[in-house]
Structures are given as C-alpha cells and as structure tokens.
Image (cartoon, rainbow, N blue to C red):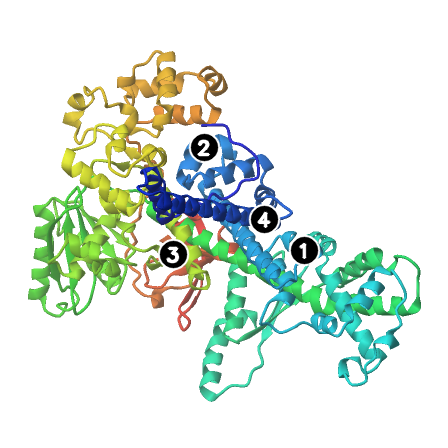
Amino acid sequence: MSSLKSPNLKRKKTQPLKARTKRAKLEIKDEVPSCSTASATTKKVKVKNEEDTKIKKAKTKESVKTVCDPQWTEYELLAEQYSLQLNVAKNVIELFEEGNTIPFIARYRRNATNNMTAEELRATKETYEEILTLKNKMTTVIKNLEKSAALTEQLKRAVTCSRTIEELEYVYAPYKTGGKRTLAERAKELGLEEPALTILNNTGKVNLYDFILENKDELKDVSAVEKGIVHIIASVMATDTEILSALRELRKNTNFAIKTKKAVTKSTKNAAENKESNEFKFENYLDFEISVKYIKPHQVLAINRGENLKVLSVKVVVPESLSHKFRTLCFNKWVNKGEKSPQRENIMKQAIEDAYSRLVEPLVKREVRSELKQKAERASCDVFSTNLKHLLLATPLKGKAILGIDPGYSNGCKLALISHVGTLVTSGVIYPHKHRSNNQNSEKDITMLKNMLLKYNCELIALGNGTACRQTEEWLTNLIESRVFSPLDIKYTVVREEGASIYSCSPEAKKEFPTLDPNIISAVSLARRVQEPLSELIKIEPKHLGIGMYQHDVKKKQLDEALDDVVSECVSFVGVDLNTASQCLLRHVAGLSEKKAQQIIDHRSKNGPFTSRKQLLDVFGIGEKVFLQCAGFLRVGPLTTEDATTFYKNPKSTKLDCTNVHPESYDTAINIIKKVGLKLGDVGETNFISVIKDKLLKVSELSAEFSSNDDTVQLILDALSKPLNYDFRNDCPKEPVFKKGLTSIGDLASGSVLTGVVNNVTHFGCFVDIGVGTNGLIHVSKCNGLNLQIGHKVEVKVINVDIGKKRIGLQALKLLM
C-alpha cells in the first residue's frame, strides 16, 4: 500500500459529465481552422470570456473555501469524537476518500487503521459523515450571512468554531431570514448595540437616560433601556467562542439527569383511551429519573417515543454547578475588567443571569438530548447489525437434501424438497391438522410425506416457526418416535419464518419460479435457510427479518446504510465463487454493484468460467479500482474435484485464488512459500498446512525481508494455514432441535428447565424461542455472565409467566453448543 499522507483532506468534486463533454467539444472545435477572420476573432473572444468566467468562478470558490475553513481539521474532530489517534484518523479519512469499502479496509488495510474491526470502521464512517454534514452546513451559513451583510469577524469565528450541528444552529439562529427576531436583534434595531458593547467591554461611561424615547414602549424609561442592553450583552456572552468552548469541556464532567413524568394534556374521549393504552406500554417511565451516565439506549428511545405520543413529559436536570461555573467564566472575562461602577456591575450580573437561563441552559439541554438520541440510534443500528450478522453467518448444511415445511391449519402445510445444491425437486401440500378426526385422510398425509422423504433420501426437515408450528412439531415428533420414516434417521429444526412470505411474492422469486404457488416458494426459502442461510437471507430486506430494537425510531437512511454494510461485510468475508454465484450474491460483494454483478454474469455466460481472479479485469466496467476492492473476496477454482488437475495446468490459474490472500500480495505469498521450502501447487493440502503451522515464522522478519507489513504477512500466513475455500462459518453454533412436550404458554410453570434458541438480542436482554409460540426474555441481569448471540442454543429456567401480557421471564443456565 502506498504511504498514507496526513495533510488536511478535502473532498474532491468530480466535474459533471455534461460540463466535461461541453468543454471537450469546445477544445476540439477551437482546433479546427476558421474560414473567416471575423468568426475566428469572435471565437477567440468567446473563449477568452469563458476563461475569464472560469477564473472568476475559481476566485469566488477559493474565497468561499477560505471563508468556510473551520477552526478544526476533519481528522482532529474525528479523533476527538471517536477517541482515535491522530495518525489513524488521518489514514481512515484518506481511505474513505479514496473510495475504499469497509470490508476491504478491515481485511487488507489493517496496518493503516491499527486493526480496526468492520464494526468500528462503520461507526467511524458515520461520525466522519456527520463531520462532513457539519462542514456543508457551515458553508451554507457563511454564504447566507454574507448575503445578508451580517457576517463579522467575531461571528465568522463563532460559526467556524462550532463542533456540533446544535452549536452551529444556536449561533446562526438570530440571523436566520424570515425567522422570529431575537430580543437582542430588536434591541439592536433600537440603537442600543453601541452602549451595550461599551458597557460590556468597559470602554467608557454610558448614561442610560440619553436613550429614552417616550413614544416607544421599548425605550420609554431607564428600566426598558437597561433591559434591551442586558439582552444584547447576554447574546454576546452566550455566543462567545471561548465561553462555548469552556462549556463544552465542562459538560463532559457534569452529571446531568433525565426525569420523566406522566404528561398532563387535555384530550377527547378516544384520545384518552389511546393514551391509557399507551400509558400501559410506558408504565416504567411515568415517574422515572436516571443519570445520563447510566441511561441505556433502549430507555432513551422508549422515552423519546413516549414524549412524541404525548404520554410522557421529559426534563433534563442540570446541576447548579454548571451555572456557577458559567458565572465565574463571565465574571473573569468581562465583569472584573477595567474600572468598577455599581451601574455596570448591576447590568452585567443581569446579563449573565439572562444569558444562562434564557440561552445557555436551553442549549445545553438540547445538546444533551441530541447526544443521547444520536447515541441511542447508533446503538439501535449496532444491535440490528450485530443480530443480522449472526443470523447471516449461521452454519450452513451444504450438500444435503432438505424438506421445507411452511405450517398451516385449514390451508395445510406446504412442502418443498430441495436437492443437495438447492434446486427444487418436488413439492406438495398436506393437511395433518384439518384431518385429525379423519384417520383415512391423515394416513394419506403421512404416506405422502414418507414417500417424498424416502424417494429423495432426505433426512432433514426445516419447519417454519409461524402459525401451527408447535402443533406440526408435535405431529412430526410422534411420527419420528414411532419410526414411521424408517430406515431414514429423520431430524428436524425449527426455522425463522420472518420475511419468507415477502420474498415469495418478490420479482426475484417470480423470476426463478414463475408458475409456482407463493406458499410453496416460502417452503423452498425455509429449506434453503438451513442449507445456505447467507445466500437465501440476503434476498430479503433486513428490516423484514424481525431482529431489531426500536428500528422504527431510527432514521431509515441511517439504518439501511448500516444494514447494507453488514450484508456486504458478511458476503465478502465468507467469500463468493466467481463461477457459480448468482447476481443477487455478487452485487453484495465489496466494490461491486447490481450493474457490475450483471456484467460479470454476462461475461461468464459469453466466455465461459473464469480461470483466475485477474480475468475480472477483462469484464466490461471492471477497472483497477473496482478490482482492488472486490478481488480478495472472490474465489476462482475448479467446478468439481475431478476438474482440479486440468484446471491448475492453466498457467493463469493459481490456488491462491481460493484463499483470502489479495492478488496485490501474491508476490509476497509466493516468496514466503519458497522460503519455507514448499510449492505453490500444494497450497491447501494437509502436509502444506502442517508445515506452515509448525514453522515458527517471525512475522516482523518476513515483513522486513519482503518489504511488506506485519498485518499483511500475518493475513497471508493465516490463509496458507487453512484448506482451500475455507468457510469460517463452520465454527459457528449449530441450529438445535426443540424438545417435545410444550406447545403453549399455558404449559409453562415457574422453575421449569427448558432449551431454546436465542432469536433476538437487545441492550436490555435476549429473546429466546422455547417452543411455546411466545418468546421468553432473559433480562441482562439474568444472563449469568453468558455472551449470548442469535442462533445460540441455551438452557434456561422459567422465572415467571404472565399469560395475560404474554410475558415469560427466563434465567440463563448454560450455553449449549
């Protein structure tokens, strides 16, 4: 990798295609000899005018750029807000500006980021984008102030010193056009700015009686004049950059609290009924107080929702120490300056009180609420992202035929059996619950199910967890225990149904199964979720998978971007076979888009399978930049084991294409292989792996010898010590089978010990499917020190059951892997 620079980084703006085309046409046109002197002269004048215009625009742009430069650099603010080292912040910004993707940076640029994880990089990117938004808004504010002739050096400094959107809005609020004028503005219009600044800076004596105008209410007496002057001085104090900077530091060590109460509102009968039902949801917050230091993200989002529904009133409790420190700052800067006088001291004290109570304290409260909301939204995105990641990276059961069952009552249970490669081989519908009273029809259902399993030698059933799941599970368990399916050793697992019905009606599903009943497509999806969960679940929008926390209280764009990044990360880190991957899978690989994925498939269809990663550069639309981002995540190898010998005889093919080693590091990898006395053709073989693991290779020495870096060398050694096409998902916990016996919440009793699957994780605990149709909650205080994740099988004890509210309290006993 090229050495990363550390200057102030500016966002590069690409000239629009139309402008580039127009300029190119003009340049070509100018090279053509002119037939007439007049037209040539006209053309020269035209070109000159255009050049003059460009120069003026450049000067204007440079002027605005100079004016809008903040009093901080992007990397300084990023380092401060995300607690990074300055050099790491610089490197991360440069990597983002170069268009590098998060999976690429996380795997192949660890040396530049101090080994930041993909999650940390996502959070850093969000913070950096917020900084860029702040800079853009700062530019807009400066331009608006220039237009209205309100920009002064002091105001410009206040704007460019702002370190948050809230602070910028606070400074700019008095100058917004069309908005309500502030008390300070009104006082300035009355001509009180000059005496106010004289008193503030103590540069002379002011006789308030000189400003009395009996025909104006705002200046009718001395107290009115004094009031106007106080408002101006208060405004100056509250927007002073030094004071705001000091307040920013004070806030970090101030213990704020959030206090909520039941909101008092007048309402109609219907509104009162709705409010009463909402109060039940927010009963924990009707009289609630907590320190900001200890409030949890889910509590912040719940309080905000309750406030929006007018169920709760929310107050930020600010300790007296902050107002005392603010007064001290103002006294030291202004009051204790110059000659003392009772009149000035009285006015300054009033101004300080007014500045704090009317301007500073509300600003602090807004910033506290804004920061809490921002952190809570980010935490909500993190929870959703983490849950999605564990769901997508569940262990696949490749190479096995699986029967998917989408259970139902009157409409029957839909069956879909897929082959070992995921293709649908047969389907049908049975009615085990509708025919329970009719033994003859029930026997037909059993026979149909048995023949289907025997014909295709299928021993695994994926049962959807929706309607009639528990009854179907009990029915299946009885058949298995009665050895109805003998000689097959039938096992079943309960699969999450969320999103299956949505996918079954999607254009992508219709494209693959144009004539198939959507209910059967749902059953196909359930079976594929067990066979290859990643490939199947990426077809569904993450928000439909039921794994979030307060997802509707988070900005849609923020959540969508975070989830898209997680999908790309999972697909990329697992790796994709370039010769067999679908367009749906390819488009999620880092650096690729839907269009580029289709171009790869078109090239593959026209020219046959790829024989090396480098052939990607032959695909129309794939350049060096795209290749750099995606190549390490794409695998290229023989389609079958029998083809391996012939495949690797091709000089363009290399076994490194089936590892995590990036093509940019192939030379280093080959040098390391030669150094330990091994052959490139043996990569992935058992003996090769043993030698790499047994050799006590020193990473630092290898990186120095081959002009690389420690992180890249370590990545190469890790890749060489694993089989070809290694899939790390095999290390993940397996999906369990539920125990038989419990089918409803009414069957539960306190003290019962059960097993279940974690299917959602939040900041306040984990939801576990224990097979009764209602998820139980393991509160964080009852997790027994276990780090539970989606898909984990856990043994739990029932603590309490509330059938009316459909709530089950659980305690974690142990993790069952």
Residue type at tag 4: Ser
Is 297 on the left or on the right of 494, as rendered? right
User: Residue 54's spot in the image, x, y percent?
Assistant: 48, 46
Question: Residue 726, relative to residue 753: is it above or below?
Answer: above
Query: Answer yes or no: do the residues labelled 4 and 1 have beta carbons within 8 Å?
Result: no
Label 1, secondary structure: give it: helix
CA distance for labels 4 and 1: 19 Å
Label 3, secondary structure: give it: loop
Q: Which residue has dot 4 on it?
A: 63
Residue count near mark 3 (Cα–Cα under 10 Å), binned few <14, some 14–19, many ≥20: many
Front residue (pair 740, 110) = 110
Residue type at tag 3: Ile
**Disc 2 vs disc 1: which is toward the camera?**
1
Residue type at tag 2: Arg
Answer with the quarter of the image where residue 613 lies. top left
Task: Decide which of tag 2 and tag 1 comes sooner along the chain.
Answer: 2
Residue type at tag 1: Ala
**Disc 4 vs disc 1: which is toward the camera?**
4
Q: Which quarter of the rendered picture does the C terminus lie within?
A: top left
Q: Which quarter of the rendered picture does the N terminus lie within?
A: top left
Q: Which residue has dot 3 on it?
A: 547
Query: Answer yes or no: do the residues labelled 2 and 1 have beta carbons within 8 Å?
Result: no
CA distance for labels 2 and 4: 37 Å
Task: Decide which of tag 3 and tag 4 comes sooner along the chain.
Answer: 4
Label for residue 158? 1
Residue 476 appears in the figure: no
CA distance for labels 2 and 1: 38 Å
Label for residue 109? 2
Question: Residue 85, relative to residue 178: is it above or below?
Answer: above
User: Residue 226's spot in the image, x, y percent?
Assistant: 82, 74
